[in-house]
Image: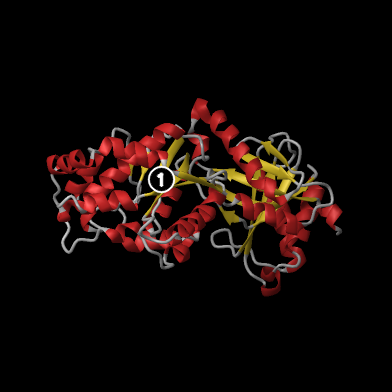
Amino acid sequence: MTMSALGEPCVLLKLGEIVLKGKNRELFERRLIANIRHALKELGLELDVRKRHGVIAIFLPTGSTPEQAEAVARRVADVPGLVWIHPAWRVAKDPDTVLKAGLELVRDTDEVRRRAPFAVRSRRRDKRFPLRSNELDRLVGGAINDEYGLPVDLKRPELTVHIEVDRDEVFVFTGGLPGQGGLPVGSSGRALVLMSGGIDSPVAAYRMMRRGLHVDFLHFSGIPFTTSESIYKAYALVRKLDRFQSQSRLWVVPFGKAQQSIRTSGQDRLAVIAQRRLMLKTAEEVAHRIRAAALITGDALGQVSSQTLANITAQDHAVELPILRPLVGWDKTEIMAEARRIGTLEISELPDEDCCSLLAPKRAETRAKIEDLKQIEKRLDAEELIVQLADSIQEYTL
């Protein structure tokens, strides 16, 4: 059988929790399709993205190769809102054509060479198709068994042939790529991430992208008392995360002189929490300017002295915007595993001169009192300082 007889390569996308959105589902689907189209622009292909009942199909130009379909699948696998991505073949809605496609699909697989157990799973979204799902399973499965001698195992197959009968065609495929799950980026609004060069904040940003937030990134640099290394590192992290949402923006605040003022305030044990509050206040001012509705941090309860419950409460008190902490209940091992999975761990572990190292007292306060922190901010004239810091930000676009 030739490639043209088998059909045309395409990609079939399976939706996640979007299907549970009821009357609002169409809004989420429109956002998801827009995100998919934007992500695929970089491939330079004329792609046709179509919504079907419960799935999205991406059709490639006539004459496209399976390798191009694989490239499309790999790119959309990074788009939140999808749970499975299947490179597939699009064939005519005819039982004989579907049968031939199923045989051709598995012919050169490793499972055939090893005589591995297999199963056929059919789904008939178009009930006008002449064969029921179980009849289609038996037709194609029997032919594969006769042609290649593979044993049938419906419980633990090593090879599964999927057949999905749709409105205008039938999709035939084996295997697929797991998606990111969650909701389409942008469906929940916009937020601002306080992005350090560490392991936690990139993971926190990713987790909130999966909940539908489009995020901007705010990095506090120790300049002029540190080098630009931390900025380069933050930029690299944002580039790595950008594949999940696109159009990311990095904002950098030169924070060194503000830190120097905190250091000379005479409250050594409170310096770290005072700095965190000043960062949050500055982030809130920036968020208002870029119309972000929340702040995101990588705090995990009890991980370091500044992240005790009392200190987190003192930080929350500094701003009116909600502070989202998606990692608050995670331990370091879990955070590192997620960072490794999304590809940010290697960058985060690169050495740099973090601005937080400028304020590292021998013993930090674990139960900061809000009134004490307010007194420090009063001496610093924090409200004026916040505006100055926000005015000094620099934007780095990807």
- Element type at mark 1: strand
Residue 94 position within the rendered picture, expressed as x and y whole percent measured from the top left: 80, 44
Residue 106 position within the rendered picture, expressed as x and y whole percent measured from the top left: 72, 62
Question: Which residue occupies 36% across, 42% down?
Answer: 389
Residue 145 position within the rendered picture, expressed as x and y whole percent measured from the top left: 71, 63
Given residues 111 and 273, the one toward you in this image is 273
Given residues 313 and 94, the one toward you in this image is 313
Q: Is residue 210 visible?
A: no
Question: What kind of residue is marked 1?
Answer: Val
Q: Which residue is mark 1?
A: 193
How did the renderer colour the structure? secondary structure
Residue 311 located left or right of residue 33: left
Given residues 392 and 188, the one toward you in this image is 392
> Where is the N terminus found, in terms of image quarters?
bottom right
Quarter-of-image position of residue 141: bottom right
Residue 143 located left or right of residue 178: right
Relative height, residue 360 to residue 211 (above, below): below
Given residues 60 and 349, the one toward you in this image is 349
Relative height, residue 149 to residue 260 (above, below): below
Neighbourhood count class around disc 1 (C-alpha, 10 Å): few under 14, some 14–19, many 20 upward: many
Q: Is residue 145 visible?
A: yes
Question: Which residue occupies 68% across, 67% down?
Answer: 150
Residue 280 located left or right of residue 272: right
